[in-house]
Amino acid sequence: MAGMPRRQALLMVAAIALLVAVLDQASKAWARGGLTPGHEVTIIPGWLWFRVASNSGATLGLGTGNNALFAVVALVIVGAIVMLALRGTVGGVLGIGALGAVAGGTLGNLVDRLRLGAVTDFIEVRYWPTDFNLADAAIRLGVVLLLLTLLLDWTHRPRRATLGAGRER
C-alpha cells in the first residue's frame, strides 16, 4: 500500500470491514424485525422498495441451496483480502477502502449464512435484477473501487523501454 506500513493498512482494512459488517447486520436485523415477509414497503414511489427475502444462493439466486459452498467461498475471499493487505499489493487509500468494503460485505453475508442458513435481502431498486442488502452493495462498490485502483496503478506505472527503441537506423 503506497507509503503506508502494512500493519496500518491491515488495521484500516479490518476497521472498514468491521464497520460494513456491523451496519449490514444492523440493517438486516431491522428488516427481519420490521418488515412483513411478502409485503413491500415503498420508499421512493416507482424506484425503491423494501421487501424482506431469504437467499441461500448467490446473486440473482444462482446456486440456491448451496449455502455451505458459499460460506467456504466467503472464507477464501476474506483470506485472500488479508493476504493482499499484508503483502501491500493494492495501492493507496482507495485500495484499502475497496478491500475493506469487500471483506465487510463478505463477512456480513457469511454471518447470515452461518446464523440463519441463508442471506437476508431487503432492498429492491427499479431496473436492478434482484433484491440485495448493504453487504451486497458494499461488495459491488468495493469491486468497482478495486478495479479503479488497479487501473489507476496500471496507467501510472512507468513503462519499460521496448527493445531497440531509440536506436537510429
Image (cartoon, grey):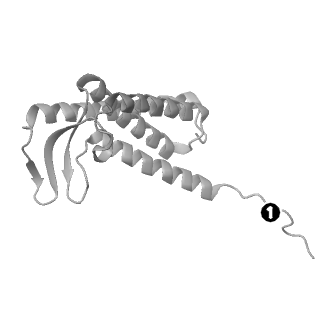
Residue at 29% across, 30% down: 22
Depth check, front residue: 136 or 61: 61
Residue at 6% across, 44% down: 39
Please tell me whether residue 98 is drawn above or below residue 29 in the rendered image: below
Residue at the spot of label 1? 162
Quarter of the figure that contains the C terminus: bottom right
* x and y, in percent, of residue 59 in the image: 32, 45
Quadrant for residue 73, please give it.
top left
Quadrant for residue 5, please give it.
top right
Left of 65 or right of it: where is 159? right
Decide if residue 12 is in sight here: no
Dot 1 crowding, Cα within 10 Å, few <14, some 14–19, many 20+:
few
Left of 38 or right of it: where is 61? right
Please tell me whether residue 118 is drawn above or below residue 62 in the rendered image: above
Depth check, front residue: 165 or 74: 74
Q: How many marks?
A: 1
Amino acid at pointer 1:
Thr
* x and y, in percent, of residue 46 in the image: 12, 60
Residue at 44% across, 47% down: 143
Depth check, front residue: 86 or 73: 73
